[in-house]
Image (cartoon, rainbow, N blue to C red):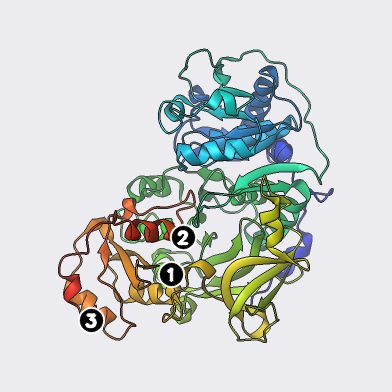
Amino acid sequence: MFTFPRLAKRANPSPERAFYLGLLWERAAAKHPGTPVTLDQPLATLPALGTDFDYASLADVVADLAARLWELGVRPSERIAVHKTDNFDIALLACAAARIGAVPVMISSALSGEIVGQLLTRLDGPWLITDVAKLTGPLDGLPVRDLTRGTLLAGTEGHGELPLIAEVEGAPRRPAVRMHSSEPALITHTSGTTGVSKLMVHNARALFHRLLPQQIIAWPIRGSETVALCMSFVHSRFFHSLGVFLNYGNPLVVLSDPDPDKIAPIFVRHRPGLVETHPNNFIQWEDLVDAPGAPLSSVRYYSSTFDAIHPRTIQRLLAASRRPRPLLIQLYGQSETGPISGAWYTEKSAGRNDGRDVGYVLPGFIRLRVVDDNGRVLPRNQPGHLELRGRGTIMTYLGEHERYRRNITDGWWRLGDMGYLGRFGKLHLIDREVDRIDHIDSNLELEDTLMSRLEELLEAIIVIGPGGEPVPVICTRRDEPLDPGRWARATADLPPLAAPLHWPFNDVPRTSTWKVRRVEITRMLREQTAPAPAPGAADRPGA
């Protein structure tokens, strides 16, 4: 059963029960000023500062950026969208905006210009921080001037008369502005796996209630391990990870590129004890298991959030560690709610895990129930729709409040996932509601089976085909050809599947957190814009 560490009561959460992004680095620097922070690339907006920092120097960067934003006209309560090329300065600009009382709006660099335009419209005239690559690329042709209060340039390259943040010099430092904990403090967006992303409004109080269980869970590794983070800079989870480890004084390595070939030398050089990335990046990092220099040998803890992770991946990662009793810590949650359940796995226990087991509902923080199609509460072990009550739930979907309200029934939030509760509140996921296929018990379970039987697979995705049939989309390591015979043997006892579509891993539509956009793949199949089936796969039994 999932339990919190016994020493958790000694954790030191924020006394005002609020998580203020604008004070994050300042408070960390007051406690642990010399703790190192290493980046894999310089800050795009202030590249001359290099890649080696500590808590105190990054607190100074945030205060400097905040002063520059104030000088450029940004004021408290105003929304300021951050949409630029991936770089750690995204997070620092967000903290700087929050420091002067503005509301940072995190917009993924992976979104199309069309979707960004829709989000800017919902924001009703925000400030926009972007860069030349975006303005001359995805945003080219978008009426940015009409959609925003003003556009500020990150990076060092100019564009017309737009002001460059980097060229604002000598702006006087200002004390931090702290808004009320019930006011909007951060706006992020949903992953967009089912369509246009929704804008989620968080306040500092709800962000605190999400932070607290994560801070308690991380208590055993306070200050003692170097932490490597390779995550979406626009996701609320990244800020919570910063909140946890800055509070405890852990050295940080912050990475923007998940490519295993680039990760390996960094891990060999810094030897992290905890690493966190998206589940689909962990799959890629299986290539590091036998890499020169044993880049994963120092890792004692793997932290996985955002989505369930394949048991095969857990076993391989843990086997690569040379630390005693390595663990993979998994939190299941949603952007609208924060963490919901948690578990940890050893190499041995991962082998017994069915992959749909996402641990125990966090005691004292989350209440979860399972209901049928009519809203009736179901008993244990009966699958249905998952609904939640918790203090970390968002305030609303900005510009779509009625859509937000439709997800709530008598105070219970509909997660959109199907699953069931086992003994002691253990949660098992089945599928997203929109992804269900009639004669398949669980697409996700079927995907886990394929991954465990075919080690050459980097990804296996079951989606709904044009005629309602289950279509497997598969990716192989280094995009190597798929052996039709091995596929036939691996699927002989499984429900009938269409011929597999063999796609390059990087061609699969994904969100900023590397989740697969299944609805988009289904659309591509319906409109016949998807790649042809892998050669020979159509001849397998049952195809």
Amino acid type, mark 1: His
Q: Distance between the residues labelled 2 and 3?
A: 27 Å
Q: Distance between the residues labelled 2 and 1?
A: 8 Å
Residue found 46% across the figure and 57% down from its top: 515
Taking 452 as reference, is 38 above or below it?
above
Residue found 69% across the figure and 61% down from its top: 406
Q: Position of residue 228 (x, y in %)?
A: 51, 49
Residue marked by disc 1: 310
The count of marks equals 3
Marker disc for residue 518: none
- Between 60 and 213, the one lying in front of the other is 213
Q: Quadrant of the C terminus?
A: bottom left
Amino acid type, mark 2: Pro
Q: For residue 317, which quarter of the picture? A: bottom left
Q: Is mark 3 on a helix, strand or loop?
A: helix
Residue 461 in the figure: left or right of residue 135: left
Marker disc for residue 489: 3
**Reading the chain from its start, which is encountered first: label 2 or label 1?**
2
Q: Classify 10 Å Cα crowding around label 2: few (below 14), some (14-19), many (20 and above).
A: many
Q: Quadrant of the N terminus?
A: bottom right
Q: Position of residue 17 (x, y in %)?
A: 81, 51
**Reading the chain from its start, which is encountered first: label 1 or label 3?**
1
Q: Is mark 2 on a helix, strand or loop?
A: helix
Front of the two marks 1 and 3: 3
Q: Where is residue 77 in the image (x, y as percent from the top left)?
A: 76, 33
**Reading the chain from its start, which is encountered first: label 2 or label 3?**
2
Q: Position of residue 221 (x, y in %)?
A: 62, 58
Marker disc for residue 279: 2
Residue 396 in the figure: left or right of residue 420: right
- Decide if residue 28 is in sight here: yes
Residue contact between numbered discs 2 and 1, judged by CB atoms under 8 Å? yes
Front of the two marks 2 and 3: 3
